[in-house]
């Protein structure tokens, strides 16, 4: 009785450890491959374009929407205490420290991480990854590294963009709709912030970028079983990387704020 | 006696409980063409993938140019692979790249050739497989036989010493099958390479082969010169050569053939 319960649980745990180990090994190989020759600039530029430039519209729209909606709630909340002036300060804090990096991370996990998983998954089941190996090319070096570099650079840049857009989202609402003074908003937005906060935001974004690229590539690389496998790879990559983004966000917030 | 270029020694490979190769021994001398025959699912692809080092044997070893494949470091393995051209069953072309970029791939990565030299070499390779003038097409625009030939061109770009062909003619019409057979013969003569070819097509097998091996339930049951293979007394070999469903070849033999008279509703009799 107890065994019928414990056996599947045990194999579940072993399976999860197996996956974690596999992910760790591949990640280690990716980091080691970063400085290996030959350097493929063309491939890297293509990834910069796919990860960075093409994600600009999505990041702008979501950042604008989330920062504006957040400002609505802040304005409403602080109005209960006749403290409307605090809304812009808290808006600044929230946008820089949390909303911009997390929204950018989650949107890119959906837009970029899933595309990586689907592309590598298709290459895996059509033997293109084996073909790479047979042409004496390490798939980790050729496929993982440019995606990792692109995400590690582009997610922080897009987070910067998201902060900028978030500033104007709050402005739109608090100045435009709530009628607060534009001059006051401009100085209050930064009141609770220090340079440290920008560093925190960019550090988070860097970690999120690494998670997105590594999980996306890993899920794609480990795809098995034809069309169904290729269908599952992006889904599981988005779920896994979103989860890890949120978990990492919690710990980074706790650690970096000390 | 010379050391064989490719030596497969007592190789066994299983996936879970399923034994695919058991105690396979094969050796290929330099310049020789070996054809491996065998039914579907008998582990022919697994054999080639083990030779390439994509799979590790459970037992035994494979040596290429005297180096034991599964004991090499990554770097050494890649050096060996530069001397081997692998032609996949479904071609496995990089579908985001044009034909030109596919063939130029290893030249760009592993040589210091200028782009003019690469251009020249790619055209030379495409010419050898009869695919000149397709260099700007994408793989999706090619037919099955054309894809395979571009795959050949990609495999020979680095001038390998060894070429491995995995079912190069399966799924093609008889004419294209003959074209591919001829391309392989041409490559063999022009490049003087050592080849292992997996095929079901007996006609091209006898044209290409210096020796023929038959893989049956994970074992090599015959490996000899084509003339000797033709008269091999083994019932499995003879059944394979006849292409007959009756015999020891299949584990679960099909129902016996209907004789013509028992077909009561034949549309021809109406
Ligand atoms: N990576 C793998 N995992 C599990 N089983 C495999 C794998 N590759 C091949 N097999 C099994 O090995 C057997 C032989 O496959 P294969 O070598 O592709 O046959 P063929 O002779 O038709 O090329 C098949 O039954 C297949 O199920
Ligand atoms: Mg096969």
Image: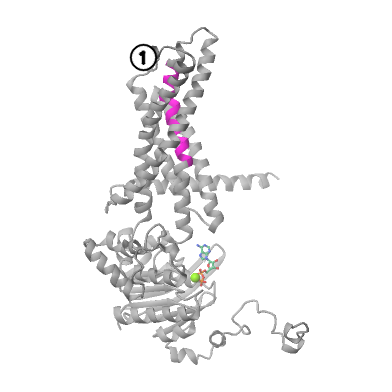
Q: Which quadrant would residue B56 be assigned to in this image?
A: bottom left
- Principal SS element in the magenta part? helix
Stretch in magenta: A89-110
Q: Quadrant of the N terminus of chain A?
A: top right
- Left of B154 or right of it: where is B236? right
Q: Is residue B24 left or right of residue B249?
A: left
Residue reaching furthest to the top: A82
Whether A29 is drawn above or below A172: the answer is: below
- Looking at the image, which residue is at 59% across and 81% down? B249
The answer to whether residue A225 is seen in the rendering is no
Q: Residues within 10 Å of mark 1 (few under 14, many from 20)?
A: few
User: Mark 1: is the Cβ under 8 angstroms from ligand 1?
Assistant: no
- Residue at figure coordinates x 45%, y 36% from the top left: A58
| Residue A178: % across, % down | 49, 14
Rendered residue at 45%/57% (across/down): A123
The location of residue B16, given as percent across then percent down, is 55, 62
Q: Position of residue A202 (x, y in %)?
A: 36, 30
**Foreground residue, B253 or B181?**
B181
Placement of A173 over or under B241, stated as above or below? above
Q: Is residue A100 above or below residue B106?
A: above
Q: Is residue B259 left or right of residue B23?
A: right
Q: Position of residue A204 (x, y in %)?
A: 40, 31
Quarter occupied by the C terminus of chain A: top left
Q: Which residue is mark 1?
A: A187
């Amino acid at each position: 009785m107890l065994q019928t319960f414990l056996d599947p649980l045990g194999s579940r745990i072993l399976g999860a450890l197996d996956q974690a180990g596999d992910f760790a090994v591949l990640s280690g190989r990716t980091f080691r491959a970063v400085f290996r020759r030959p350097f493929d600039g063309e491939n890297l530029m293509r990834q910069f374009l796919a990860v960075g430039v093409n994600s600009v519209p999505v990041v702008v729209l979501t950042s604008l929407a989330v920062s504006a909606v957040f400002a609505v709630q802040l304005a409403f909340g602080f109005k209960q205490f006749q403290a409307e002036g605090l809304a812009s300060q808290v808006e600044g804090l929230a946008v820089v420290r949390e909303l911009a990096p997390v929204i950018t991370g989650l949107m890119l996990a959906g837009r970029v991480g899933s595309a990586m998983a689907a592309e590598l998954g298709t290459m895996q089941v059509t033997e293109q990854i084996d073909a790479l190996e047979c042409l004496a090319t390490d798939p980790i070096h050729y496929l993982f590294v440019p995606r990792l570099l692109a995400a590690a650079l582009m997610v922080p840049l897009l987070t910067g963009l998201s902060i900028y857009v978030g500033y104007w989202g709050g402005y739109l609402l608090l100045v435009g709709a709530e009628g607060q003074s534009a001059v006051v908003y401009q100085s209050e937005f930064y009141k609770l912030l220090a340079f440290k906060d920008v560093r925190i935001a960019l550090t988070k974004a860097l970690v999120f970028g690494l998670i997105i690229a590594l999980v996306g590539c890993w899920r794609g690389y480990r795809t098995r079983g034809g069309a169904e496998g290729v269908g599952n790879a992006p889904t599981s990559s988005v779920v896994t990387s979103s989860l890890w983004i949120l978990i990492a966000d919690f710990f980074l917030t706790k650690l970096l704020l000390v | 006696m010379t050391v064989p270029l490719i030596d497969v020694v007592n190789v066994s490979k299983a996936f879970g409980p399923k034994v695919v190769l058991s105690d396979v021994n094969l050796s290929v001398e330099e310049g020789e063409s070996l054809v491996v025959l065998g039914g579907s699912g008998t582990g022919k692809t697994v054999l080639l993938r083990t030779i390439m080092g994509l799979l590790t044997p459970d037992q035994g070893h494979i040596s290429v140019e005297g180096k034991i494949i599964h004991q090499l470091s990554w770097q050494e393995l890649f050096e060996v692979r530069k001397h081997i051209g692998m032609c996949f069953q479904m071609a496995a072309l990089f579908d985001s790249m044009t034909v030109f970029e596919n063939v130029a791939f290893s030249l760009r990565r592993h040589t210091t050739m200028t782009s003019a030299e690469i251009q020249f070499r790619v055209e030379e390779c495409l010419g050898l497989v009869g695919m000149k003038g397709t260099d700007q097409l994408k793989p999706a625009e090619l037919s099955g036989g054309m894809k395979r030939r571009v795959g050949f061109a990609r495999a020979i770009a680095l001038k390998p010493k060894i070429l491995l062909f995995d079912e190069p003619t399966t799924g093609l019409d008889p004419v294209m099958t003959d074209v591919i057979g001829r391309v392989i013969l041409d490559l063999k003569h022009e490049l003087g390479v050592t080849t292992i070819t997996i095929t079901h097509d007996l006609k091209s097998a006898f044209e290409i082969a210096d020796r023929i091996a038959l893989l049956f339930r994970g074992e090599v049951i015959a490996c000899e010169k084509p003339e000797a293979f033709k008269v091999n007394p083994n019932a499995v070999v003879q059944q394979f050569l006849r292409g007959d469903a009756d015999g020891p070849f299949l584990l679960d033999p099909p129902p016996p053939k209907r004789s013509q008279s028992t077909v009561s509703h034949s549309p021809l009799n109406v």
